[in-house]
Protein backbone atom coordinates (compact mmCIF):
# COMPACT_ATOMS: atom_id res chain seq x y z
CA UNK A 1 0.00 0.00 0.00
CA UNK A 2 1.33 3.48 -0.83
CA UNK A 3 1.58 6.04 1.93
CA UNK A 4 -1.33 7.89 0.37
CA UNK A 5 -3.45 4.74 0.47
CA UNK A 6 -2.48 4.18 4.12
CA UNK A 7 -3.56 7.72 4.93
CA UNK A 8 -6.82 7.30 3.04
CA UNK A 9 -7.55 4.19 5.11
CA UNK A 10 -6.99 6.20 8.31
CA UNK A 11 -9.73 8.69 7.48
CA UNK A 12 -13.17 7.89 8.92
CA UNK A 13 -14.81 8.68 5.55
CA UNK A 14 -14.21 10.21 2.15
CA UNK A 15 -12.89 13.79 2.03
CA UNK A 16 -16.39 14.85 0.97
CA UNK A 17 -17.93 13.13 4.03
CA UNK A 18 -15.34 14.68 6.35
CA UNK A 19 -15.85 18.16 4.96
CA UNK A 20 -19.62 17.90 5.37
CA UNK A 21 -19.21 16.65 8.92
CA UNK A 22 -17.10 19.73 9.68
CA UNK A 23 -19.04 22.21 7.58
CA UNK A 24 -20.29 24.46 10.38
CA UNK A 25 -16.77 24.96 11.73
CA UNK A 26 -15.36 25.47 8.23
CA UNK A 27 -17.92 28.17 7.42
CA UNK A 28 -17.51 29.90 10.80
CA UNK A 29 -13.72 29.79 10.46
CA UNK A 30 -13.78 31.35 7.01
CA UNK A 31 -16.17 34.10 8.12
CA UNK A 32 -13.88 34.96 11.00
CA UNK A 33 -10.86 35.00 8.67
CA UNK A 34 -12.67 37.34 6.23
CA UNK A 35 -13.46 39.76 9.08
CA UNK A 36 -9.75 40.68 9.20
CA UNK A 37 -9.19 43.39 6.54
CA UNK A 38 -5.94 43.34 4.58
CA UNK A 39 -6.09 45.92 1.80
CA UNK A 40 -2.69 45.97 0.11
CA UNK A 41 -3.46 49.13 -1.88
CA UNK A 42 -4.11 51.27 1.21
CA UNK A 43 -2.52 49.34 4.07
CA UNK A 44 -5.85 48.95 5.88
CA UNK A 45 -5.59 45.96 8.22
CA UNK A 46 -1.81 45.50 7.88
CA UNK A 47 0.29 44.20 9.61
CA UNK A 48 -2.47 42.28 11.48
CA UNK A 49 -3.50 40.65 8.17
CA UNK A 50 -0.04 39.07 7.83
CA UNK A 51 -0.13 37.78 11.42
CA UNK A 52 -3.57 36.33 10.84
CA UNK A 53 -2.52 34.50 7.64
CA UNK A 54 0.52 33.19 9.50
CA UNK A 55 -1.69 31.87 12.32
CA UNK A 56 -3.93 30.08 9.79
CA UNK A 57 -0.90 28.44 8.17
CA UNK A 58 0.33 27.27 11.58
CA UNK A 59 -3.13 25.96 12.51
CA UNK A 60 -3.07 23.86 9.33
CA UNK A 61 -0.05 21.98 10.70
CA UNK A 62 2.60 23.71 8.58
CA UNK A 63 5.88 25.26 9.67
CA UNK A 64 5.29 28.97 9.02
CA UNK A 65 7.65 31.70 7.89
CA UNK A 66 7.36 35.27 6.66
CA UNK A 67 9.41 36.55 3.71
CA UNK A 68 9.58 40.12 2.51
CA UNK A 69 11.56 42.00 -0.15
CA UNK A 70 12.07 45.67 -0.93
CA UNK A 71 9.57 46.82 1.69
CA UNK A 72 6.74 44.86 0.04
CA UNK A 73 3.88 43.30 1.99
CA UNK A 74 5.17 39.96 3.21
CA UNK A 75 4.75 36.57 1.59
CA UNK A 76 3.48 34.08 4.19
CA UNK A 77 4.89 30.60 3.64
CA UNK A 78 4.13 27.25 5.28
CA UNK A 79 5.83 23.93 4.68
CA UNK A 80 5.26 20.33 5.66
CA UNK A 81 7.11 17.35 4.25
CA UNK A 82 5.19 14.31 3.02
CA UNK A 83 6.39 10.72 2.68
CA UNK A 84 9.88 10.25 1.22
CA UNK A 85 9.77 10.31 -2.57
CA UNK A 86 6.34 11.93 -2.76
CA UNK A 87 5.90 14.95 -5.04
CA UNK A 88 6.25 18.45 -3.57
CA UNK A 89 3.39 20.76 -4.53
CA UNK A 90 3.49 24.53 -4.04
CA UNK A 91 0.01 25.92 -3.35
CA UNK A 92 -0.39 29.62 -4.17
CA UNK A 93 -3.06 32.07 -3.01
CA UNK A 94 -3.16 35.60 -1.59
CA UNK A 95 -4.32 37.02 1.73
CA UNK A 96 -4.56 40.66 0.65
CA UNK A 97 -7.89 41.97 -0.66
CA UNK A 98 -9.20 44.77 -2.84
CA UNK A 99 -10.46 47.97 -1.18
CA UNK A 100 -14.13 47.59 -0.19
CA UNK A 101 -15.26 50.65 -2.20
CA UNK A 102 -18.36 52.68 -1.26
CA UNK A 103 -20.06 51.08 1.78
CA UNK A 104 -23.53 52.11 0.56
CA UNK A 105 -23.18 49.81 -2.47
CA UNK A 106 -22.91 46.78 -0.18
CA UNK A 107 -25.96 44.99 1.27
CA UNK A 108 -23.93 44.18 4.40
CA UNK A 109 -20.65 45.39 5.86
CA UNK A 110 -17.70 44.14 3.72
CA UNK A 111 -15.66 43.14 6.78
CA UNK A 112 -18.56 41.74 8.85
CA UNK A 113 -19.28 38.64 6.77
CA UNK A 114 -22.79 37.21 6.75
CA UNK A 115 -24.22 33.87 5.61
CA UNK A 116 -27.26 34.41 3.39
CA UNK A 117 -28.87 32.47 0.51
CA UNK A 118 -26.20 29.77 0.60
CA UNK A 119 -23.37 32.27 0.22
CA UNK A 120 -20.87 33.99 2.49
CA UNK A 121 -20.81 37.74 1.73
CA UNK A 122 -17.78 39.91 2.43
CA UNK A 123 -14.60 41.38 0.89
CA UNK A 124 -12.14 38.59 0.21
CA UNK A 125 -14.58 35.65 0.45
CA UNK A 126 -13.94 34.52 -3.14
CA UNK A 127 -10.82 36.57 -3.90
CA UNK A 128 -8.97 34.98 -2.31
CA UNK A 129 -9.44 33.94 1.31
CA UNK A 130 -12.11 31.31 0.69
CA UNK A 131 -9.88 29.67 -1.93
CA UNK A 132 -6.66 29.35 0.07
CA UNK A 133 -8.62 28.69 3.29
CA UNK A 134 -10.04 25.59 1.52
CA UNK A 135 -6.47 24.38 0.92
CA UNK A 136 -5.47 25.16 4.52
CA UNK A 137 -8.48 23.35 5.95
CA UNK A 138 -7.75 20.31 3.76
CA UNK A 139 -4.26 20.27 5.29
CA UNK A 140 -5.72 20.69 8.78
CA UNK A 141 -8.08 17.73 8.30
CA UNK A 142 -5.14 15.53 7.24
CA UNK A 143 -3.29 16.67 10.35
CA UNK A 144 -6.25 15.94 12.59
CA UNK A 145 -7.14 12.48 11.23
CA UNK A 146 -3.86 11.10 9.89
CA UNK A 147 -1.13 13.21 11.49
CA UNK A 148 0.61 13.43 8.12
CA UNK A 149 0.15 14.52 4.51
CA UNK A 150 0.04 12.31 1.39
CA UNK A 151 2.69 14.49 -0.33
CA UNK A 152 5.01 17.39 0.49
CA UNK A 153 3.35 20.79 0.55
CA UNK A 154 4.52 24.40 0.60
CA UNK A 155 1.80 27.03 0.85
CA UNK A 156 2.58 30.54 -0.51
CA UNK A 157 0.21 33.31 0.53
CA UNK A 158 0.97 36.54 -1.32
CA UNK A 159 0.39 39.81 0.54
CA UNK A 160 0.28 42.04 -2.53
CA UNK A 161 -1.44 40.16 -5.36
CA UNK A 162 -4.08 42.88 -5.66
CA UNK A 163 -1.38 45.45 -6.42
CA UNK A 164 0.35 43.26 -9.01
CA UNK A 165 2.72 41.22 -6.79
CA UNK A 166 5.59 43.69 -7.32
CA UNK A 167 8.11 41.85 -5.13
CA UNK A 168 7.04 38.21 -5.57
CA UNK A 169 9.70 37.34 -8.16
CA UNK A 170 12.47 38.95 -6.06
CA UNK A 171 11.34 37.08 -2.94
CA UNK A 172 11.16 33.72 -4.72
CA UNK A 173 14.61 34.25 -6.27
CA UNK A 174 16.08 35.18 -2.88
CA UNK A 175 14.71 32.03 -1.21
CA UNK A 176 14.84 29.64 -4.17
CA UNK A 177 15.76 26.69 -1.89
CA UNK A 178 12.36 26.86 -0.13
CA UNK A 179 10.52 26.39 -3.41
CA UNK A 180 12.22 23.30 -4.77
CA UNK A 181 8.87 21.81 -5.80
CA UNK A 182 7.58 19.66 -8.64
CA UNK A 183 4.59 21.79 -9.56
CA UNK A 184 2.63 24.85 -8.57
CA UNK A 185 -1.13 24.80 -8.11
CA UNK A 186 -2.59 28.28 -7.82
CA UNK A 187 -6.18 28.85 -6.73
CA UNK A 188 -7.61 32.20 -7.77
CA UNK A 189 -10.17 33.59 -10.25
CA UNK A 190 -13.43 31.67 -10.79
CA UNK A 191 -14.72 28.40 -12.16
CA UNK A 192 -16.09 28.55 -15.74
CA UNK A 193 -19.10 30.87 -16.31
CA UNK A 194 -21.19 27.76 -17.02
CA UNK A 195 -20.60 26.70 -13.40
CA UNK A 196 -18.33 23.81 -14.45
CA UNK A 197 -15.09 23.34 -12.52
CA UNK A 198 -12.00 23.98 -14.59
CA UNK A 199 -8.23 23.57 -14.68
CA UNK A 200 -6.10 26.17 -16.45
CA UNK A 201 -2.56 26.28 -17.77
CA UNK A 202 -1.36 29.78 -18.51
CA UNK A 203 -2.09 33.42 -19.06
CA UNK A 204 -1.17 36.14 -21.53
CA UNK A 205 1.36 38.72 -20.40
CA UNK A 206 0.93 42.46 -20.64
CA UNK A 207 2.97 45.49 -21.65
CA UNK A 208 1.53 48.89 -20.75
CA UNK A 209 2.54 52.08 -22.56
CA UNK A 210 1.82 55.77 -22.30
CA UNK A 211 2.17 57.97 -25.40
CA UNK A 212 2.37 61.73 -24.99
CA UNK A 213 2.56 64.72 -27.30
CA UNK A 214 3.14 68.26 -26.07
CA UNK A 215 2.20 71.52 -27.80
CA UNK A 216 1.87 75.12 -26.60
CA UNK A 217 2.36 75.97 -22.94
CA UNK A 218 -1.41 76.35 -22.45
CA UNK A 219 -4.65 75.60 -24.37
CA UNK A 220 -5.08 78.27 -27.09
CA UNK A 221 -7.95 79.95 -29.00
CA UNK A 222 -8.12 77.98 -32.29
CA UNK A 223 -8.91 81.13 -34.28
CA UNK A 224 -6.15 83.25 -32.82
CA UNK A 225 -3.50 80.53 -33.06
CA UNK A 226 -4.76 77.96 -35.65
CA UNK A 227 -2.00 77.31 -38.27
CA UNK A 228 0.46 79.05 -35.92
CA UNK A 229 0.68 76.66 -32.97
CA UNK A 230 1.30 72.93 -33.53
CA UNK A 231 -1.52 70.72 -32.26
CA UNK A 232 -0.45 67.77 -30.05
CA UNK A 233 -3.80 66.02 -30.62
CA UNK A 234 -2.95 65.64 -34.33
CA UNK A 235 0.54 64.42 -33.47
CA UNK A 236 -0.88 61.80 -31.11
CA UNK A 237 -3.51 60.43 -33.51
CA UNK A 238 -0.91 60.20 -36.30
CA UNK A 239 1.36 58.29 -33.93
CA UNK A 240 -1.45 55.90 -33.01
CA UNK A 241 -2.36 55.44 -36.66
CA UNK A 242 1.21 54.46 -37.55
CA UNK A 243 0.97 51.42 -35.26
CA UNK A 244 -1.74 49.59 -37.27
CA UNK A 245 -2.89 49.65 -40.89
CA UNK A 246 -6.60 50.21 -41.70
CA UNK A 247 -7.17 46.43 -41.83
CA UNK A 248 -5.97 46.13 -38.24
CA UNK A 249 -2.55 44.61 -38.93
CA UNK A 250 0.17 45.74 -36.52
CA UNK A 251 2.89 47.61 -38.42
CA UNK A 252 5.62 47.46 -35.76
CA UNK A 253 8.55 45.50 -37.22
CA UNK A 254 9.24 42.32 -35.23
CA UNK A 255 6.11 42.73 -33.08
CA UNK A 256 5.49 38.94 -33.08
CA UNK A 257 9.15 37.92 -32.82
CA UNK A 258 9.75 35.01 -30.45
CA UNK A 259 6.08 34.09 -30.28
CA UNK A 260 5.88 30.36 -29.60
CA UNK A 261 3.25 28.48 -31.58
CA UNK A 262 0.32 26.99 -29.72
CA UNK A 263 1.04 23.31 -28.99
CA UNK A 264 -1.30 20.90 -30.81
CA UNK A 265 -2.66 19.52 -27.53
CA UNK A 266 -3.58 23.05 -26.42
CA UNK A 267 -5.26 23.78 -29.76
CA UNK A 268 -7.35 20.62 -29.45
CA UNK A 269 -8.31 21.52 -25.88
CA UNK A 270 -9.47 24.98 -26.98
CA UNK A 271 -11.61 23.40 -29.68
CA UNK A 272 -13.29 21.22 -27.06
CA UNK A 273 -14.36 24.13 -24.81
CA UNK A 274 -18.03 25.09 -24.76
CA UNK A 275 -18.86 28.39 -26.47
CA UNK A 276 -22.08 30.13 -27.44
CA UNK A 277 -20.55 32.82 -29.66
CA UNK A 278 -23.81 34.60 -30.65
CA UNK A 279 -24.68 34.87 -26.96
CA UNK A 280 -21.20 36.19 -26.04
CA UNK A 281 -21.33 38.76 -28.85
CA UNK A 282 -24.97 39.69 -28.15
CA UNK A 283 -24.06 40.32 -24.53
CA UNK A 284 -21.55 42.99 -25.59
CA UNK A 285 -23.80 44.49 -28.26
CA UNK A 286 -21.90 43.16 -31.29
CA UNK A 287 -22.86 40.90 -34.18
CA UNK A 288 -19.39 39.80 -35.29
CA UNK A 289 -15.79 39.51 -34.18
CA UNK A 290 -12.95 41.86 -35.20
CA UNK A 291 -12.38 41.15 -38.94
CA UNK A 292 -8.65 41.79 -38.52
CA UNK A 293 -8.45 38.25 -37.09
CA UNK A 294 -10.72 36.46 -39.57
CA UNK A 295 -9.91 32.76 -39.75
CA UNK A 296 -9.01 32.50 -36.07
CA UNK A 297 -11.33 30.98 -33.50
CA UNK A 298 -12.62 32.91 -30.49
CA UNK A 299 -10.17 31.21 -28.13
CA UNK A 300 -7.20 31.54 -30.50
CA UNK A 301 -7.82 35.27 -30.64
CA UNK A 302 -7.89 35.44 -26.84
CA UNK A 303 -4.98 33.24 -25.91
CA UNK A 304 -2.77 32.64 -28.94
CA UNK A 305 -2.34 36.13 -30.43
CA UNK A 306 -0.95 39.34 -28.96
CA UNK A 307 -3.18 42.40 -28.90
CA UNK A 308 -2.48 46.09 -29.39
CA UNK A 309 -5.23 48.04 -27.67
CA UNK A 310 -5.79 51.79 -27.30
CA UNK A 311 -7.24 52.02 -23.80
CA UNK A 312 -8.03 55.69 -23.91
CA UNK A 313 -7.11 59.06 -25.36
CA UNK A 314 -7.06 62.22 -23.33
CA UNK A 315 -6.73 65.66 -24.87
CA UNK A 316 -8.47 69.01 -25.25
CA UNK A 317 -12.20 69.53 -24.83
CA UNK A 318 -14.88 68.40 -27.33
CA UNK A 319 -17.06 71.42 -26.50
CA UNK A 320 -14.55 74.28 -26.83
CA UNK A 321 -12.76 75.72 -29.89
CA UNK A 322 -9.22 75.27 -28.60
CA UNK A 323 -5.84 73.91 -29.57
CA UNK A 324 -4.93 71.56 -26.70
CA UNK A 325 -1.61 71.87 -24.87
CA UNK A 326 -1.10 68.10 -24.42
CA UNK A 327 -2.43 64.81 -25.75
CA UNK A 328 -1.98 61.43 -24.10
CA UNK A 329 -2.94 57.84 -24.90
CA UNK A 330 -2.77 54.63 -22.86
CA UNK A 331 -2.01 51.39 -24.69
CA UNK A 332 -1.88 47.82 -23.52
CA UNK A 333 -0.34 44.96 -25.43
CA UNK A 334 -1.34 41.48 -24.27
CA UNK A 335 1.59 39.18 -24.93
CA UNK A 336 1.70 35.47 -25.73
CA UNK A 337 4.38 32.98 -24.61
CA UNK A 338 7.83 33.73 -26.00
CA UNK A 339 7.31 37.51 -26.31
CA UNK A 340 9.61 39.47 -24.01
CA UNK A 341 7.85 42.62 -22.68
CA UNK A 342 11.05 44.71 -22.76
CA UNK A 343 11.91 43.63 -26.33
CA UNK A 344 8.39 44.44 -27.55
CA UNK A 345 8.60 47.83 -25.84
CA UNK A 346 11.89 48.58 -27.59
CA UNK A 347 10.42 47.65 -30.98
CA UNK A 348 7.37 49.87 -30.48
CA UNK A 349 9.60 52.73 -29.28
CA UNK A 350 11.92 52.30 -32.31
CA UNK A 351 8.90 52.34 -34.67
CA UNK A 352 7.59 55.54 -33.09
CA UNK A 353 11.04 57.19 -33.25
CA UNK A 354 10.94 56.75 -37.03
CA UNK A 355 7.25 57.42 -37.76
CA UNK A 356 6.21 59.83 -34.98
CA UNK A 357 9.35 61.34 -33.46
CA UNK A 358 7.45 64.20 -31.77
CA UNK A 359 5.60 61.74 -29.50
CA UNK A 360 7.24 60.28 -26.37
CA UNK A 361 6.51 56.75 -25.19
CA UNK A 362 7.12 55.30 -21.73
CA UNK A 363 6.61 51.80 -20.42
CA UNK A 364 4.35 51.74 -17.35
CA UNK A 365 4.26 47.98 -16.75
CA UNK A 366 5.43 44.66 -18.15
CA UNK A 367 4.53 41.06 -17.25
CA UNK A 368 5.50 38.07 -19.41
CA UNK A 369 3.00 35.41 -20.46
CA UNK A 370 3.14 31.88 -19.06
CA UNK A 371 2.40 28.47 -20.50
CA UNK A 372 2.30 24.97 -19.05
CA UNK A 373 1.30 22.61 -21.85
CA UNK A 374 -1.97 20.87 -21.24
CA UNK A 375 -0.40 17.45 -21.72
CA UNK A 376 1.90 17.92 -18.68
CA UNK A 377 1.96 14.94 -16.29
CA UNK A 378 0.02 16.63 -13.44
CA UNK A 379 -3.20 17.79 -15.09
CA UNK A 380 -4.74 14.29 -14.96
CA UNK A 381 -4.20 14.29 -11.16
CA UNK A 382 -5.84 17.67 -10.69
CA UNK A 383 -8.73 16.69 -12.94
CA UNK A 384 -9.18 13.38 -11.11
CA UNK A 385 -9.35 15.20 -7.76
CA UNK A 386 -12.22 17.32 -9.09
CA UNK A 387 -14.04 14.34 -10.62
CA UNK A 388 -13.82 12.37 -7.37
CA UNK A 389 -15.70 15.10 -5.53
CA UNK A 390 -18.10 16.43 -8.16
CA UNK A 391 -18.65 13.31 -10.26
CA UNK A 392 -17.83 15.27 -13.43
CA UNK A 393 -14.56 15.89 -15.27
CA UNK A 394 -13.50 19.57 -15.27
CA UNK A 395 -13.04 21.75 -18.34
CA UNK A 396 -9.38 21.92 -19.36
CA UNK A 397 -8.46 25.48 -20.33
CA UNK A 398 -5.07 25.91 -22.05
CA UNK A 399 -4.76 29.63 -21.29
CA UNK A 400 -6.63 32.71 -20.18
CA UNK A 401 -6.62 35.91 -22.19
CA UNK A 402 -5.98 37.98 -19.05
CA UNK A 403 -2.78 38.44 -17.06
CA UNK A 404 -1.55 37.05 -13.74
CA UNK A 405 2.02 36.84 -12.36
CA UNK A 406 2.11 33.13 -13.28
CA UNK A 407 5.50 33.63 -15.02
CA UNK A 408 7.19 33.69 -11.60
CA UNK A 409 6.30 30.00 -11.27
CA UNK A 410 7.03 28.90 -14.84
CA UNK A 411 10.08 31.14 -15.47
CA UNK A 412 11.59 32.03 -12.08
CA UNK A 413 10.95 28.64 -10.43
CA UNK A 414 10.89 26.70 -13.72
CA UNK A 415 7.91 24.57 -12.67
CA UNK A 416 4.69 23.45 -14.31
CA UNK A 417 1.96 25.77 -13.02
CA UNK A 418 -1.68 24.73 -12.95
CA UNK A 419 -4.66 26.93 -12.10
CA UNK A 420 -7.38 25.41 -9.93
CA UNK A 421 -10.02 28.14 -9.43
CA UNK A 422 -12.28 27.39 -6.45
CA UNK A 423 -14.84 30.23 -6.42
CA UNK A 424 -18.22 30.60 -8.15
CA UNK A 425 -18.18 32.64 -11.39
CA UNK A 426 -20.56 35.27 -9.92
CA UNK A 427 -18.35 35.90 -6.88
CA UNK A 428 -18.34 39.67 -7.66
CA UNK A 429 -14.65 39.93 -6.82
CA UNK A 430 -13.32 43.49 -6.74
CA UNK A 431 -16.97 44.70 -6.75
CA UNK A 432 -19.55 45.37 -4.01
CA UNK A 433 -21.26 42.30 -2.49
CA UNK A 434 -18.38 39.91 -3.08
CA UNK A 435 -19.48 36.43 -2.12
CA UNK A 436 -18.54 32.76 -2.08
CA UNK A 437 -21.08 30.00 -2.54
CA UNK A 438 -20.94 27.59 0.39
CA UNK A 439 -21.41 24.54 -1.86
CA UNK A 440 -18.35 25.54 -3.91
CA UNK A 441 -16.33 26.23 -0.74
CA UNK A 442 -17.12 22.81 0.75
CA UNK A 443 -16.48 20.96 -2.53
CA UNK A 444 -13.26 22.99 -2.88
CA UNK A 445 -12.03 21.80 0.51
CA UNK A 446 -12.73 18.18 -0.44
CA UNK A 447 -11.07 18.69 -3.86
CA UNK A 448 -7.94 20.06 -2.13
CA UNK A 449 -7.78 16.87 -0.02
CA UNK A 450 -8.28 14.66 -3.08
CA UNK A 451 -5.57 16.59 -4.93
CA UNK A 452 -2.99 15.69 -2.29
CA UNK A 453 -4.13 12.06 -2.40
CA UNK A 454 -3.82 12.01 -6.19
CA UNK A 455 -0.35 13.55 -6.13
CA UNK A 456 0.74 11.28 -3.28
CA UNK A 457 -0.44 8.12 -5.02
CA UNK A 458 1.10 8.97 -8.36
CA UNK A 459 3.70 6.51 -9.51
CA UNK A 460 6.23 6.52 -12.32
CA UNK A 461 7.36 9.90 -13.65
CA UNK A 462 5.55 11.79 -10.89
CA UNK A 463 7.30 10.12 -7.99
CA UNK A 464 10.55 11.73 -6.87
CA UNK A 465 13.65 9.60 -6.47
CA UNK A 466 14.18 8.97 -2.76
CA UNK A 467 17.48 9.96 -1.16
CA UNK A 468 18.94 6.46 -1.63
CA UNK A 469 17.82 6.22 -5.27
CA UNK A 470 19.04 9.69 -6.19
ZN1 LIG B 1 -8.37 40.03 -7.05
Image (cartoon, helix red, strand yellow):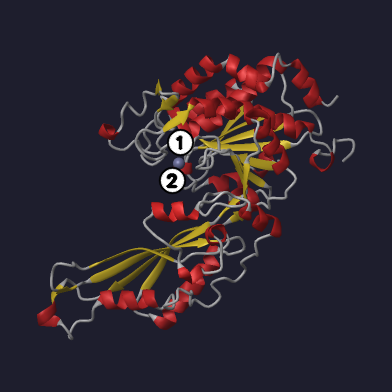
Q: Please say if 273 is above or below 36.
A: below
Say the numbered circle drawn on residue 216: none
180 displayed left or right of 298: right
Residue 10 visible in the snapshot: yes
| CB contact under 8 Å: marks 1 and 2 | yes
Q: Which dot marks residue 163?
A: 2
Q: Residues within 10 Å of mark 1 (few under 14, many from 20)?
A: many
Which secondary structure lies at badge 1?
loop
Quadrant for ligand 1? top left
Is ligand 1 less than 8 Å from the beta carbon at label 2? Answer: no
Q: Position of residue 413 (x, y in %)?
A: 66, 48
The residue closer to the viewer here, 192 or 186, is 192
> Which of the marked residues, 1 or 2, is nearer the chain's N terminus?
1
Residue that numbered label 1 is attached to: 96
Kind of element beneath mark 2: helix
- Does 361 sit left or right of 173 as displayed? left
Q: Position of residue 188 (x, y in %)?
A: 53, 39
Q: Position of residue 340 (x, y in %)?
A: 57, 64
For residue 222, above or below residue 367 = below
Residue in the image at 41% along x and 61% along y: 287
The local crowd at label 2, few if under 14, some if 14 to 19, many if 20 or more residues have their Cα within 10 Å, is some
Amino acid sequence: MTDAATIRAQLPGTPRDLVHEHQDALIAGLMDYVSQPGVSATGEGFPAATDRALAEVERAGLTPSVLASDGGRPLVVGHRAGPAGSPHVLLYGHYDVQPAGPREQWDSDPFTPVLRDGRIWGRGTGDNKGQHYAHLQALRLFDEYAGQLPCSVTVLLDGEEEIGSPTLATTLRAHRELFDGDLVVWSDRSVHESGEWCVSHGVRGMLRLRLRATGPSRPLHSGNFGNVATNPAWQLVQALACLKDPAGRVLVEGFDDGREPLPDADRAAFAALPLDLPQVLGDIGLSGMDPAFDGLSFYERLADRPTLTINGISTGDVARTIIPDTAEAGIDIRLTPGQDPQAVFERVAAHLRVHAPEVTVVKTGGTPASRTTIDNPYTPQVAAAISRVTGRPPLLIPAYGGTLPDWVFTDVLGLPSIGLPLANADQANHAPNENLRVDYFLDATAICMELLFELGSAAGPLARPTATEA
